[in-house]
Image (cartoon, rainbow, N blue to C red):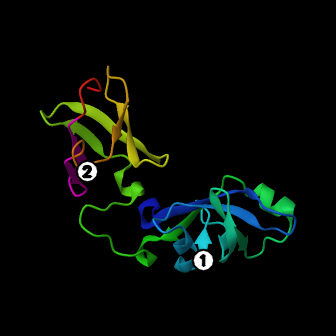
Amino acid sequence: MTKTDRVCVGAIAGAFGVKGEVRLKSFCTEPTDIASYGPLSTEKGDRSFRVTLTRPVAGALGARLSDVTTKEEADALRGVGLYVDRARLPSLGDDEFYHADLIGLEVRDTGGALLGRVHAVHNHGAGDILEVAGAAGREGLLLPFTRAVVPTVDLAAGRIVADPPEGLD
C-alpha cells in the first residue's frame, strides 16, 4: 500500500488518566467520525488500533485503543499519527479536498509564476491555511485556503493557482 492509499485522520496527543485511555486529536470534519472508519494504523502500518471514544476532553477526545491498557503504553504513543485506508473514507463533494492530497502540489500565481509547493495545511480555528515552501530564491508563504485566494485546485495536473493578497507576493 502506498502512502497516498492512506490518509491521516488523527493523532494521539498523550495519555488521559491511568488506565491506558488517550487524548485523541481528530482531523475529521466531524471529530467523532474518527471511530467509525474501523481499525486505524500507524504511519508505517506496523500497529493497528480499534478506537472506542469515551468522552470529550479539552481540545480532543478521550479514547480507548485496543491493546493499550496502561498510562505508560498510552504515553509511549504520544505524537503517533493514525491512518485509514482511503477507500474507507467518505466521498468528497466538489471543491473539497483531503489535506494529504494538497501537500506537494505546485503553486503558481495567476500569471503563471512558480510560488513553490504546498508543504503543509494548518488550521488554527479560523480556516485552513496552506504553507507554501518557496521556489528557488523566494521565501515561503502562508495562504488562506479560500476561493478568493486559491481559485483553482487541479489534483490531476498536480497544481494550484493562487492569487495572494497584496503584500504576500
Asked if the residues shown at circle 2 and circle 1 are in contact, with their CB atoms under 8 angstroms apart, the answer is no
Q: Which residue is mark 2?
A: 158
x and y percentages locating residue 87 in the rendered image: 41, 76
Region rendered in magenta: 151-163
Q: Which residue is mark 1?
A: 39
Q: Residue at x 46, y 60 (%)?
A: 3
Task: Name the disc covering residue 167, or none.
Answer: none
Q: Residue at x 30, y 62 (%)?
A: 96
Amino acid on which the number 1 mark rests in the picture: Pro
Q: How many marks?
A: 2
- Residue 55 left/right relative to 83: right
x and y percentages locating residue 85 in the rendered image: 48, 72
Amino acid on which the number 2 mark rests in the picture: Gly
Q: Quadrant of the C terminus?
A: top left
Q: Residue at x 26, y 40 (%)?
A: 107
Mark 2 and mark 1 lie on one chain; the one further toward the N terminus is 1
